[in-house]
Image (cartoon, grey):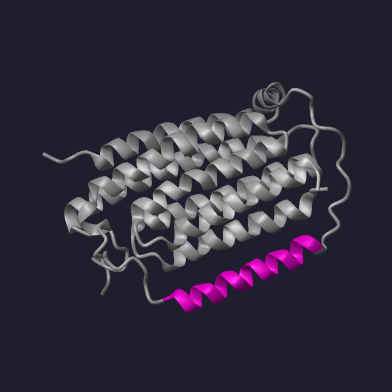
Amino acid sequence: MNAEALAFCALAAMVLVGGALVVYSRNLVHAAVSLVPTLLGVAGLYVLLHAEFVAAIQILIYVGAITVLILFVILLTEGATGLRVRQRNEQVPLALGVCGALVALLWVVLLRVPWGPAAGPLPPYNPGAVGRSFLMPYVLAFEVTSLVILASLVGAIVIARREE
Amino acid sequence: MIGLPHYLVLSSLLFGMGLFGVLTRRNAVAILMGIELMLNAANLNFVAFTKFVDPTFVRGHVAALVIITLAACEAAVGLALIINAYRHLETVNVDQVNLLKG
């Protein structure tokens, strides 16, 4: 087993155990905190895939911002997220069946397709290539995304504000 | 040697777990956490395909960055909605928020 396989196995275990705790834990604070190793493991996998810029953004936004936001909301809605409240509905067997079937279908489809060899090497300096891609062919996606984030932040402030 | 199939298997497992969380949780915040897991699985696929199938213009990285941004938007709006619902209804359990049910 070489170093890459070892790193992949460790990161995959981190992601899967963290994800299982996120969906299984009875205590919502534990679930939100186990989101951190899951997202960090995904960031590590990005580094393994030579996507350092995406990994940095993942840590900044997901681990830094979204997890803290989720913890704050759990704090603010304590009456409904407390330990005495039942956290799971009665669909567990059905959901297990649906998720198992979906994962099996994905495996069958994804592993059967011949994806072929890579159409060339990755650019040596990723952030530069990402920036050029954003500003040359995908400038419309970039602008629309910035419009969406502006609208959603204004909307979030309006919705969450206490009415007089 | 770690190749594309390993990443695809891992990301489909992560997606299945996120879907399980969305389907079985009662609390809206926990459902949002399941959605974040599913978005991460999709992002992992994008980045893996960029390395192993289509690396020249790093299209998958662009898509992953756009998805991360939209996930931040979704979390902000969703959590604002949850706070507002809690203020009016005293609950964030999605099976008890049924004002429109006939």
The extreme left residue here reads: A164
Q: Quadrant of residue A112?
A: bottom right
Q: Is residue A129 magenta?
A: no
Left or right position of B31 against B8: left
The part of the chain drawn in magenta is: A91-111
Left or right position of A92 against A160: right
Q: Quadrant of residue B31?
A: bottom left
Q: Quadrant of residue B14?
A: bottom right
Q: Main secondary structure of the magenta part?
A: helix
Place of residue B47 in the rendered image (x, y in percent of width and height, measured from the top left): 69, 42
Residue visible at 55% across and 36% down in the picture: A58
Q: Nearer the viewer, residue B40 or A132?
A: B40
Residue visible at 76% across and 47% down in the picture: A5
Left or right position of B57 against A104: right
Residue visible at 86% across and 57% down in the picture: A114
Q: Quadrant of the C terminus of chain A?
A: top left
Q: Is residue B54 visible?
A: yes
The extreme front residue here reads: A1
Place of residue A39 in the rendered image (x, y in percent of width and height, measured from the top left): 53, 44
Q: Nearer the viewer, residue A84 or B84?
A: A84
Q: Nearer the viewer, residue B20 or A113?
A: B20
Q: How many marks?
A: 0
Residue visible at 62% across and 69% down in the picture: A102
